[in-house]
Amino acid sequence: MPKVLIVTNDFPPRAGGIQFFVHALAMRLPPEDVRVYAPAWEGAAGFDAQLPFPVVRHPTSLMLPVPAVARRAEEIIKREGCDTVVFGAAAPLGLLAPQLRRAGARRIVALTHGHEAGWASLPGARAMLRRIGDNVDTVTYLGEYTRLRLSWALSRAAAERMTRLAPGVDTSEFHPGAGGAAVRERFGLGTRPVVVCVSRMVPRKGQDTLIRTWPLVRVGVPDAVLFLVGADAQAQTSPQGGWIAAQTVPEDFVARSVRRPPRRVPIYPRYQAEPDEVYPRYYPGPDAVRVCNATYAQEYRPSGPVIVPHMTCVWRRG
């Protein structure tokens, strides 16, 4: 059995999907054959003490492909006799592959998690991915979409060596009826209809939007409960990590509030300033035309790109 060193910036107790993926991968290897080199993080000592394999923590919370990180990884390889290196995320630590191969690693694997597909479209990041792909034995991918996007950045030889590594589902933990009654009893949900969102509680995940719009749901289903589970919440959470947002619908909130008719943006004089100025900036004239320019930012996910529009509008004089 090969002895594996996992070199990663993404490892618990820091919360996140990549962290969970890498941790689950390590836990499924024989504990005597796996070592982890990861950054320091609050609560790391207590978390590491419960693991069946040793974790070497970097002095800081971020690891970059610099000589100090390479030197520590080389020391672990030689001291523990590791012959396989797994980079928890291909970039940027995958740039250390040549040094670690010289230190004794015979096989090197670089994991990808979807966001690298976006990097593949950027010139500097694309060159970095190509270099990583040429120096590791295989680059993993989650699905056909990310494989195609990554293959554009890799050399032909590296693209042909790509390996699919997608997360599975532990059917002993996740199956119909698993924990339903116990969770309902634990959090006092009773028989009420529940919508569950399990994710880190950070702005880009959208739980704040769920909470703000939940009264709209309760117009049609008055006893519905929004049940949020996650870490990093900037809000009051229960000790069990669950956060129930069961907002009360205002008494004057009625069905007609669900959809409002569109209206024009008001343009009116702002008399506290100059007489000819109007909100938002100036008086555009009676025949003014409102011109809007939209740009789009792409965030790549394993299932495909997410398009985020950014719109800027100005008033052009008639």
Image (cartoon, grey):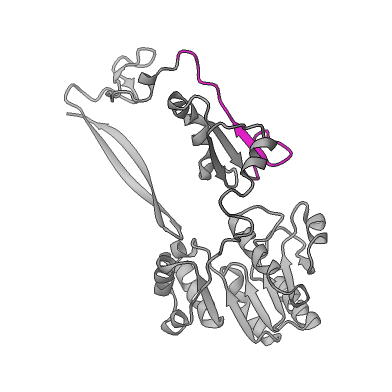
Is 206 situated above or below 217?
below
The quadrant holding residue 117 is bottom left
The answer to whether residue 81 is magenta is: no
Is 125 situated above or below 42?
below
Q: Nearer the viewer, residue 65 or 169?
A: 169
Position of 225 with respect to 188 (left or right) is: left
Position of 229 with respect to 260 (left or right) is: right
Count numbered badges in the picture: 0
Residue 159 position in % (x across, y down): 44, 79
Residue 284 position in % (x across, y down): 24, 25
The answer to whether residue 236 is magenta is: yes
- Residue 75 in sight here: yes
Position of 70 with respect to 253 (left or right) is: right
Is 12 situated above or below 100?
above
Position of 33 with respect to 191 (left or right) is: right
Q: Nearer the viewer, residue 303 or 108?
A: 303
Q: Quadrant of the N terminus?
A: bottom right
- Residue 128 in sight here: no
Give the magenta range: 231-252
Residue drawn at (45%, 13%), measured in percent from left and top? 252
Residue drawn at (56%, 70%), measured in percent from left and top? 111
Residue 54 position in % (x across, y down): 80, 69
The quadrant holding residue 99 is bottom right
The quadrant holding residue 59 is bottom right
Q: Nearer the viewer, residue 269 or 17?
A: 17
Q: Nearer the viewer, residue 66 or 194?
A: 194
Residue 178 position in % (x across, y down): 62, 49
Task: Assign the magenta stretch its main secondary structure.
Answer: loop
Q: Quadrant of the C terminus?
A: top left
Is 129 situated above or below 173?
below
